[in-house]
Amino acid sequence: YRVGVTRYGSMDLPVLRGTASMSGLGWGELLAVDDEVIGVLTGHNGREILAVTGDTVARFVRAATRQPYRGFAHRGFAWQALNSDALKAHFGQQPTDPGVLIRTLYVGGTGSDLLRSGDILTRLGPYEIDPEGDIDHPAYGAIRFTLALNEATGDTLAAEIIRDGERRTLALQRSRFGEDVYRVHPYEFDAALDYAVFGGLVVQELSLDYLKRWGADWDREAPVRLLIEMRQSSLRRKGEPPERVLLINRVLPDPVNLGYEIGNAIVSEVNGRRVAGLTAFREAVRHPQGAFHVIRLLGGQGRSQLVFRAAEVAQADARIRQTYGIPTAQ
């Protein structure tokens, strides 16, 4: 089996990839080698399997015994490899020096309160970080340094950095993201889908579950604009206001929206108001711009705006709810 890194939600965790001796396996099956359990299956394609490592499961069990349960730690920063001599020279580094560049800080997560943009992170826990962002792990070999965030269950994690040419040691508080960090919902459990219907537009907040509607290869098959939001802007950076990515799922055909055959378009503004989620959307549609409702879409998606006559929408909404069996609350 090969050891790699896969993202679960917003965490980097070690996984095993390989070939099983049988096909038709299900999720949650135990993966064993020489009668020793080494992982739990989380996915498969024929005989090709993906499994979370046994060490990760054991750490989860240990963490779950602590009350209150804190969850696994999240990385509160974005980083960049320092793998070119020119880039290293720009930051005063020698070609063989270790470390990666801290680029962006999020509003929560490990390191978000003590690290700064421009810091060079050279060590995390017991591991020196090479310029590519890898560590030499005793069990996994060369693997991404972010795994060190959850190697232990203590409250803090030692980090060594270079800031303005000076070496410093920091005690990073291990913490997970709060709900307000996410612009794209990472997962949704035990909750009904929240959505709004306006003029036949079915509007909802973007989530990972929504993207997975495109199947096992969703990260290649889903609409490009939605994938960009997921890959580049799913987490809120420091200084940014709370918001969710809002999209038009589909249009329920009705005379009021004739010609608006769109789907998976991101909404940026409604009636001159920035909409940072469904709550803001529902409030914005209560305030038309004169005789019209104007919905602006993010650029590069075909149409730039949708316009409805305010006098027609209320009657149309009642008709659409009756036609499609939509609860009044939506």
Image (cartoon, rainbow, N blue to C red):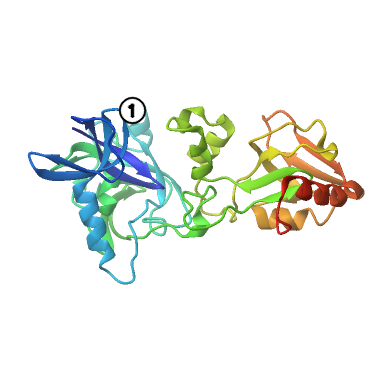
Rendered position, 172 above or below 167: below
Q: Residue farthest to the bottom?
A: 67
Q: Which residue is mark 1?
A: 84
Q: Which residue is found at the position 30% from the left and 50% from the top?
A: 161
Q: Tell me the amino acid under the disc marked 1.
A: Ser
The picture quadrant where one finds residue 131 is top left
Coordinates of residue 109 in the picture (x, y in percent): 40, 56
Q: Which residue is found at the position 49% from the left and 53% from the top?
A: 188
Q: How many marks?
A: 1
Q: Secondary structure at mark 1?
A: loop
Q: Give left or right: position of 111 versus 49.
A: right
> Would you call the spot at circle 1 few (<14 residues within 10 Å), some (14-19), or many (20 or more)?
few
- Judge by depth and name the residue closer to the eye, 283 or 319: 319
Quadrant including the C terminus: bottom right
Q: Give left or right: position of 271 versus 161.
A: right
Report if residue 320 is visible in the image. Answer: yes
The picture quadrant where one finds residue 175 is bottom left
Quadrant including the N terminus: top left
- Judge by depth and name the residue closer to the eye, 127 or 303: 303
Coordinates of residue 29 in the picture (x, y in percent): 24, 44
Coordinates of residue 49 in the picture (x, y in percent): 27, 33
Q: Which residue is found at the position 33% from the left and 28% from the top?
A: 84
Report if residue 122 is visible in the image. Answer: no
Coordinates of residue 305 in the picture (x, y in percent): 77, 37
